[in-house]
Image (cartoon, rainbow, N blue to C red):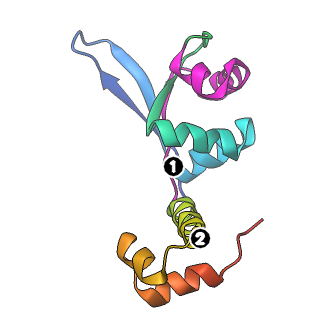
Amino acid sequence: METAQDERGQGQDGHHQAWRLHGASMTAAKIDQIIGKRARLAMAEVRQSIYVPLIPKPSSPLATMVGLGNAIKLSQVFGGQVIDLPKSAAEKLARRNAKIKEAAQRGQTVRQLASDYCLTDRQVRNVLKTRAKS
């Protein structure tokens, strides 16, 4: 089981900076509970990590990504920390497969798709046979 660990960074002036929260799957699951998976994935598309202010302002990068209400919810749990926003391998694979299916519907051949995505023809055919999970 993965555990979260905090780590303090020191600025040039010797003052402590924000806590950095590690434990990617635990953090991702917690964020999903707080603001939902769709909002977390949107955050991860834009940034790999983000500072969660103690009191978010409407103009903060976090609030502009997920909205002030969600930023406030996150600050209640992660305020003052930098959280890592990993994209899981499964999520990347699902996005790639969706792109392959869309390209096939637009008329790209299996051979073209295999070349574009560095896959074999058989791998592309297997992707095209699978149904999207709902």
Q: Is residue 104 above or below residue 74?
A: below
Q: Residue at x 58, y 67 (%)?
A: 106
Between 22 and 117, the one lying in front of the other is 117
Q: Which residue is mark 2?
A: 101
Instruction: State the residue lying farthest toward the right.
Output: 134
Q: Mark 2 Cα within 10 Å, few/some/many (few <14, many 20+)?
A: many
Q: Is residue 46 above or below residue 12?
A: below
Look at label 2 and name its amino acid.
Answer: Lys
In-image side of 100 versus 117 (left or right): right
Residue 74 x/y as whole percent? 65, 27
Residue 75, magenta (yes or no)? yes
Hey, which quadrant is residue 32 in on the image? top right
In-image side of 83 versus 115 (left or right): right
Q: For the magenta stretch, what is the residue range?
A: 60-88
- What kind of element bears circle 1? helix
Q: Is residue 117 above or below residue 130?
A: above
Q: Which residue is mark 1?
A: 24
- What kind of element bears circle 2? helix
Hey, which quadrant is residue 13 in on the image? top left
Q: Residue at x 59, y 21 (%)?
A: 64
- Would you say residue 73 is visible in this rendering? yes
Residue 58, magenta (yes or no)? no
Residue 2, label in figure: none
Residue 40 x/y as whole percent? 62, 41
Between 36 and 84, the one lying in front of the other is 36
